[in-house]
Structures are given as C-alpha cells and as structure tokens.
Amino acid sequence: QRMSNTVAKKIRVLIADDHQVVREGLTSVLESKGDIEVVGLAADGKEAVLKARELSPDVIIMDISMPNMNGVEATRQIKKESPQIGVVVLTMYADEEYIFDLVRAGAGSYLLKDTDSAQIAKAIRAVSKGESMIHPSIAAKILNEFSQLSSGKIQKNSKALRSEEDLSEREIEVLKLLAEGKSNKEIANELELSDKTIKNHIHHIFQKLNVTDRTKAVISAVRMGLIDLK
C-alpha cells in the first residue's frame, strides 16, 4: 500500500501510572504500533493534570489508584479544563464505585490491565475519534447499575425527553449497538447503512439526550428506560 505524500498525524498519548514498569512497558508497546506517539509520562494524578495542561495530548491512559491524586479526580480536573482530551482508564479491578465516578467525570474507555496491547491501541484510536470502548465485564456492571436505577426514582425525573418518540426507532437501534461497544463502521455494516448516516444518527442522539459522548448516551438511555439491556 503506497503512502500518501502527507504523513498521517500520530495520536499523541500521555501515560499516567504510578508504576515505572507499566509506564515503560506501555510506552514501548504503543510506540511500536506506528500511529501512536507517547508524548509524556506521569507518576501520579497531580502530575497527570499538569502534564495534560502542558502537553495537550489527544488521549491519556489513566490508572485509577495513584498517590497524591487518584485517577478519578485527575480525570475530573482534566476533562473540566480540556474536554477534548480523551481518557482511557486502565485498571486492575472492575470496581463499581470508581467506574460510576469515572463515567460522571467523563472518561471514554474502561479497560482492565489484563487487556492485550492490540485492544489498548484500539481503545486509544476509538477515544481519539470521540468513540468509547468498555471492557465487557465493566460494561455489564455499569448497565446493571443503571438498569436498576431506571426502574426507580430517576425514571420519573427524566424530563430531558418529552416522550420516547423523540428518539426514532432507528436511533434506538443505533444506541443498542453503541451499548455493545461497536464502532461506527461496525454499526453501519450491521444496519446496512453508510458511515455518514450512522454519524448523523449519533449526532442527533447526542443532541436529543443532551450528552457529548457515547458512554453517557448509552447510560442516559438506560436510565430513561429507552433501551433495555439484558
């Protein structure tokens, strides 16, 4: 395959983890992918916030458990200052309490540390394009939690949509596939539509649910009882 005369812009990544061996390992693995460049390393949450400000990376790989400031608080501060920076959370445990805090803080992907490097690279590429990737065991916990909530008080408070008709059947179909972590291309193939049409559907879903990313769209829809995920 011939290279075009313009070199593709690499995805600029900051790695925040308190273990040097993890930082070094991830750096060498990610740099070998060709389309990813590690521009900085941080050993704790405070350093992650400072480096994010200084380097403006496209994506941050964020560990949860770090000294001085944990990954949840660091994500919250970074997303507040620079909402365009994508965050991939890499954690040892699928700990519910942290997961829900991270969803609220605006992280886009949640992977367990036993995830292979190809999946981590895939998550970085997805998040850099504003998409989400969630480890299935973590996704199940998020959806289970919000499914339980959706039958309770939150259901009554959901005034964001005037009625379920505000989302078309096609948009709900797209939402269900988003909830399975499928990319735009995979959704387009499954529904036999063009990538551009899927992008438009997702744009309208975000507007109607008043959200800015795929994870929050799915969670909002589950909370409102618009999609029922088993």
Image: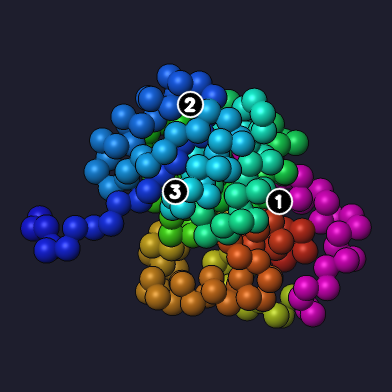
Residue tagged 3: 55
Q: Nearer the viewer, residue 197 or 112?
A: 112
Callout 2: SS = loop
> Does the magenta run of residues contain 205?
no
> Residue 95, image x and y in percent?
69, 31
What amino acid type should be assigned to the residue bearing mark 3?
Answer: Leu
* Residue 98 versus residue 225 in the image, above or below: above
Residue at the image position 85 percent from the left and 62 percent from the top: 155
N-terminal of the two: label 3 or label 1? 3
Q: Characterize the local packing of mark 3: few (<14), some (14-19) or many (20 or more) Cα atoms within 10 angstroms.
A: few
Q: Which mark is residue 104?
A: 1
Residue tagged 2: 114
* Residue 95 versus residue 86 in the image, above or below: above
Residue at the image position 58 percent from the left and 43 percent from the top: 49
Residue 161 picture quarter: bottom right
Q: Is residue 77 left or right of residue 152?
A: left
Callout 1: SS = helix
Q: Characterize the local packing of mark 1: few (<14), some (14-19) or many (20 or more) Cα atoms within 10 angstroms.
A: some
The quarter of the picture where the N terminus appears is: bottom left
Q: From mark 3 to mark 2, how far is it between C-alphas?
A: 28 Å
Q: Characterize the local packing of mark 2: few (<14), some (14-19) or many (20 or more) Cα atoms within 10 angstroms.
A: few
Q: Is residue 167 left or right of residue 57?
A: right
Q: From mark 3 to mark 1, how far is it between C-alphas?
A: 24 Å
What amino acid type should be assigned to the residue bearing mark 1?
Answer: Arg
Please tell me whether mark 2 or mark 1 is closer to you in this view.
Answer: 1
> Residue 165, image x and y in percent?
71, 80
Q: From mark 2 to mark 1, how far is it between C-alphas?
A: 24 Å
